[in-house]
Amino acid sequence: MQTVTITFDELYVESGQQCAYDSLALHDGHDTEAPLIGRYCGSRGPQPLTTSSSAVFVVFISDTDINVGRFALSWKVNEGLCHRHNFTGDTRTTSF
């Protein structure tokens, strides 16, 4: 089975207790019903993490108070193809 390894290249999201204001959530599957890998905020992302399947669902949540935030993720599928995408305050949905 294929897996996906996610690396946080950059994380700059409003921090708060339990990431209550802004957060980046990763789910181990195709949607928000999949198990939650983690919810992240602030300026330090986790070490690289690997899903248990070939899909990861990324959700960025932001309140309207502080409009500063960005993150950059790299991901690797199986043996090799590495992808990178920078995410900013754009509210459009991007599919890969």
Image (spheres, rainbow, N blue to C red):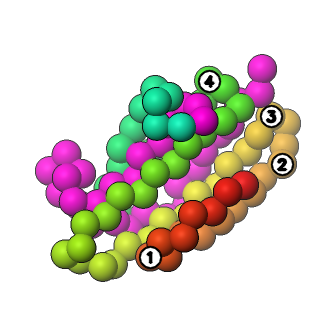
Q: From where the camera sits, is residue 41 visible? A: yes
Q: Say whether disc 3 or disc 1 marks the residue closer to the N-terminus.
A: 3
Instruction: Locate residue 10, reporting x and y percent.
Output: 49, 64
Q: Tell me whether the residue at label 2 lies in contact with that at label 1, contact meaning CB atoms closer than 8 angstroms.
A: no
Task: Residue type at mark 4: give it.
Answer: Ser
Q: Say whether disc 4 or disc 2 marks the residue closer to the N-terminus.
A: 4
Query: Which secondary structure, mark 3?
Result: loop
> Which residue appears at 30% of the width and 79% of the height?
67
Task: Residue type at mark 2: give it.
Answer: Leu
In space, the residues marked 3 and 2 are separated at their CA atoms by 8 Å
> Which residue appears at 53% of the width and 54% of the height?
8
* 42 with respect to 17 (left or right): right
Mark 1, Cα crowd under 10 Å, few <14 / some 14-19 / many 20+, is: few
Locate the N terminus by quadrant.
top right
- For residue 29: magenta? yes
Location of mark 3 (residue): 78
Q: Relative to 85, say whether 38 is above or below.
A: above
Badge number at residue 52: 4
Q: From where the camera sits, is residue 88 visible? A: no
Task: Residue type at mark 3: give it.
Answer: Asn
Chain part drawn in magenta: 1-30
Q: Say whether disc 3 or disc 4 marks the residue closer to the N-terminus.
A: 4
Q: Tell me whether the residue at label 4 lies in contact with that at label 2, contact meaning CB atoms closer than 8 angstroms.
A: no
Location of mark 1 (residue): 89
Instruction: Locate residue 61, reporting x and y percent.
Output: 35, 58
In space, the residues marked 3 and 1 are separated at their CA atoms by 30 Å
Q: Tell me whether the residue at label 3 lies in contact with that at label 2, contact meaning CB atoms closer than 8 angstroms.
A: yes
